[in-house]
Image (spheres, rainbow, N blue to C red):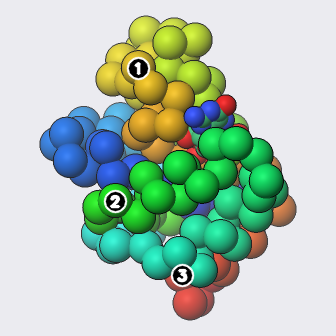
Amino acid sequence: TQRTLVLLKPDAVRRGLVGEVIGRIERKADWKITALELRTLDRATLEQHYAEHVGRPFYEPLVEFMLSGPVVVMAVEGERVIDGVRQLAGPTDPIAAAPGSIRGDFGTIVRENLIHASDSEESAVRELKLFFQEG
Ligand code: GTP
Ligand code: MG
């Protein structure tokens, strides 16, 4: 069984979509939310979280956006949950994301794409440690 880090980004919180998105995760068979917090992130955490994107043109606006309001930080556990949450989210660009996915149903702007989910086993371990003391 796997664990993954999920962030509901500031746009999801501002737009009142937290219940909608959490509901989709909760309804998947065998998945469990094992930690959940509404939290305003700090720059140091985001710089580590998005280290792979340093130097890209969207990096600084992305960090600013992620600092623009509280996010929901979650650990989710269950059967193939790492790929599973990525599938629920859909591709990075919400216009390319199929209807039925979270980004496809609710997003239009690439930066404001509602949700983050770890993209591999290694990212999940790293990100869970970064966002939760206990990993
Ligand atoms: P996350 O789950 O948030 O990591 O999204 P992702 O894995 O689908 O995308 P990626 O890790 O490549 O990029 C991280 C975030 O940066 C994305 O979710 C977007 O919010 C933003 N982003 C990525 N690429 C672009 C881009 O080309 N333009 C803009 N404006 N934002 C981007
Ligand atoms: Mg990513």
Relative to 108, residue 118 above or below? below
Vertical position of residue 123 compared to residue 129: above or below:
above
Specify whether residue 36 is in view.
yes
Front-lying residue, 69 or 2: 69
The kind of residue on which mark 2 rests is Ser
Real-space CA distance between mark 1 and mark 2, rounded to the nearest whole angstrom: 18 Å
Mark 1 C-beta closer than 8 Å to ligand 1 = no
**Of the two numbered discs 1 and 2 in the rendering, the one whose residue sits closer to the viewer:** 2
* Residue that badge 1 annotates: 108
**Amino acid residing under circle 1:** Thr
Where residue 30 sits: x, y (%)?
A: 49, 47
Q: Residue drawn at (58%, 89%), measured in percent from left and top?
A: 134
**Amino acid type of the residue that numbered disc 3 sits on in the rendered structure:** Phe
Compared across the picture, whether 75 is left or right of 19 comes to right
Disc 2 residue: CB within 8 Å of ligand 1: no
Distance from disc 3 to disc 1, alpha carbons, whole Å, reads 30 Å
Q: Could you say which disc has been placed on residue 132 in the image?
A: 3
Task: Give the number of the mark in front: 2 or 3.
Answer: 2
Relative image position of residue 52 (x, y in whole percent): 80, 56
Q: Residue visible at 56% across and 90% down?
A: 133
The total number of labels drawn is 3
Q: Secondary structure at mark 2?
A: loop
Relative height, residue 76 to residue 84 (above, below): below
Judging depth in this view, the residue of 48 and 68 nearest the camera is 68
The label on residue 68 is: 2
Residue in view at x 54 percent, y 81 percent: 132
**Where on the picture, by quarter, is residue 93?**
top right
- Tell me if 98 is positioned left or right of 25 in this view: right
Q: Nearer the viewer, residue 41 or 87?
A: 41
